Image: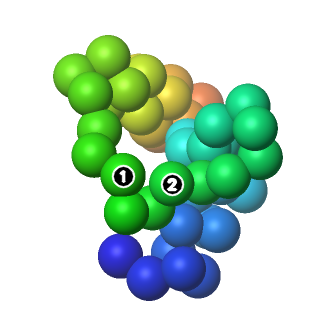
Amino acid sequence: MGIQRNGDRNQAGIMQGYTDGRFGAEDGITRAEMAVIVDRWMAKQSRESKR
């Protein structure tokens, strides 16, 4: 995943980074963080399918 693609996900509200302002693209990810990402992605897909 390139930097531009990370920016796309940030703009879509799926991935937002840490509260200290960094994104942490090279950091590991926890199950809880992955659950949040999947939940946001599914909610976005649901909203878009209702258009």
- Callout 1 environment at 10 Å: few (<14), some (14 to 19), or many (20+)? few
Please state if 50 lies on the left or on the right of 39 as rendered.
right
For residue 3, above or below residue 32: below
Residue at left offset 64%, top offset 37%: 18
Residue 41: mark: none
Residue at left offset 51%, top offset 54%: 24
Which is more toward the observer, 14 or 23? 23
Circles 2 and 1: CB distance less than 8 Å? yes
Please state if 49 lies on the left or on the right of 31 as rendered.
right
Q: What's the amino acid at mark 2?
A: Gly
For residue 34, above or below residue 13: above
- Callout 2 environment at 10 Å: few (<14), some (14 to 19), or many (20+)? few
- The residue where tag 1 is placed is 27
Q: What's the amino acid at mark 1?
A: Asp
* Corner quadrant of residue 48: top right
Q: CA distance from mark 2 to mark 1?
A: 5 Å
Residue at left offset 36%, top offset 52%: 27
Q: Position of residue 49 (x, y in %)?
A: 50, 38
Label 2: state its secondary structure: loop
- In the picture as drawn, the residue positioned furthest to the left comes out as 31
- Of the 4 image quadrants, the one containing the C terminus is top right
- The residue where tag 2 is placed is 24
Which is more toward the observer, 26 or 47? 26
Residue at left offset 62%, top offset 44%: 17
* Corner quadrant of residue 7: bottom right
For residue 39, above or below residue 13: above
The answer to whether residue 6 of the structure is visible from this angle is yes
Which is more toward the observer, 50 or 1? 1
Q: Position of residue 12 (x, y in %)?
A: 66, 51
- Of the 4 image quadrants, the one containing the N terminus is bottom left
